[in-house]
Image (spheres, rainbow, N blue to C red):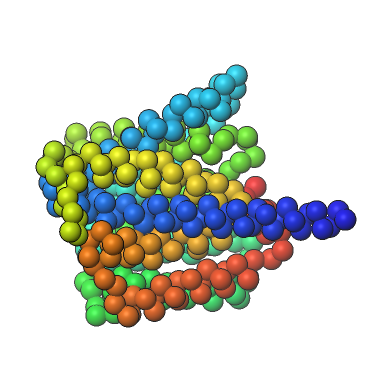
Amino acid sequence: MATMTHDTRVGGRLRSGLGFAVLSASSFGLSGPLASGLMDAGWSSAAAVAVRVLLAGVVLAPVAAFQLRGRWGLLRRTAPLITAYGLAAVAGCQLAFFNAVARMEVGVALLVEYTAPVAVVAWLWLRRGQRPTRLTVVGAVLGLLGLTLVLDLVSGARADVVGVLWALGAMVGAAVYFVLSARDDDGLPGTVLAAGGLLLGGVALLVAGAVGIVPFAVSARPVAFDGFTVPWWLPVLALGVVTAALAYVAGIAAVRRLGSRLASFVALTEVVSALLFAWLLLGEAPGGVRLVGGALILGGVVAVKLGEPRGEARRTAR
């Protein structure tokens, strides 16, 4: 009976973890098409992201304060974790990606950044002795091959060395996001981690724009999508509430249930979601090669899940 109860709990955590992971990836995937519309209306990418994460932090702050009632000392004890999350996983990752795409094609920069799951696997192996299984390696190969097809890099693309280094910085930031999100042994609620990190990261992005590290421009012009136009505040609101507040909270919940390794591979489905939303909002229909790439990514996720030793996800999250 005890074994059945344990298996039920593990299965429940797996299902809910996968649900949160897909929700997070889908929410993150919506950010690209929404931001694209804003940038066509005169927004710079840095301004769109800064407003996005700051708005998300403001939305989550009341919930975080409610969860912390009577436990404000916890916020002080976990300040280093929140600071690292905000500066590395939020601001650092975004700033590195901005600088990468300024020197190289977006598809190449994304491919480098989305090797973060491989970095997570390497970290867990070197730091915690969690050697990847053969199926995990197969899943990584399938995922990277799928990304190459989804991002349409088969025709060849040029890469700048400095740009690649910036993209690698973005990859490190993404890997830090998965590793730090798994930290739940100190009792810090995921919403508090997300709210604090987003507010801190948003302020850092504003400072970066103010000193000229990244271009910063906003516009009140209407935003045009495929077949319809909306006021500027509507995509901004969706960026903050859906693609940041919801996405980060759901992502942390997913990592704490699945572990850094599996959650990072499930997050690759973000590129598939981005393709679908680009089709719906921007009229950019994906070709057959990209659909094959999406199938390979999903196959890679399945392989990684099958390669997880029993109970490994829970140990990873500790």
Q: Residue at x 84, y 57 (%)?
A: 3
The residue sitting at the right extreme is 1
Position above or below: 33 against 300: above
105 horizontally vs 269: left or right: left
Residue at x-position 25% and y-position 59%: 281
In this view, the residue in front, 196 or 163, is 196
Residue lying furthest top: 70
- Count of numbered marks: 0
Q: Is residue 112 visible?
A: no
Residue 54's spot in the image, x, y percent? 33, 35
Q: Nearer the viewer, residue 76 or 249?
A: 249
51 with respect to 262 (left or right)? left
Residue 81 x/y as whole percent: 51, 37
Q: Is residue 295 above or below residue 52?
A: below
- Please, is residue 274 above or below residue 200 in the view? below
In front of the other: 316 or 131: 316
Q: Quick check: 273 left or right of 99?
A: right
Across and down, in percent, residue 98 comes to: 25, 51
- Residue 247 in sight from this viewpoint: yes
- The relative height of residue 153 versus residue 95 in the rendered view (above or below) is below
Quadrant of the image containing the N terminus: bottom right
Residue 118 spot, x, y in % from top left: 48, 64
**Snapshot quadrant of residue 84:** top left
Residue at x-position 26% and y-position 51%: 34
Please name the residue shown 17% across and 59% down the image: 227
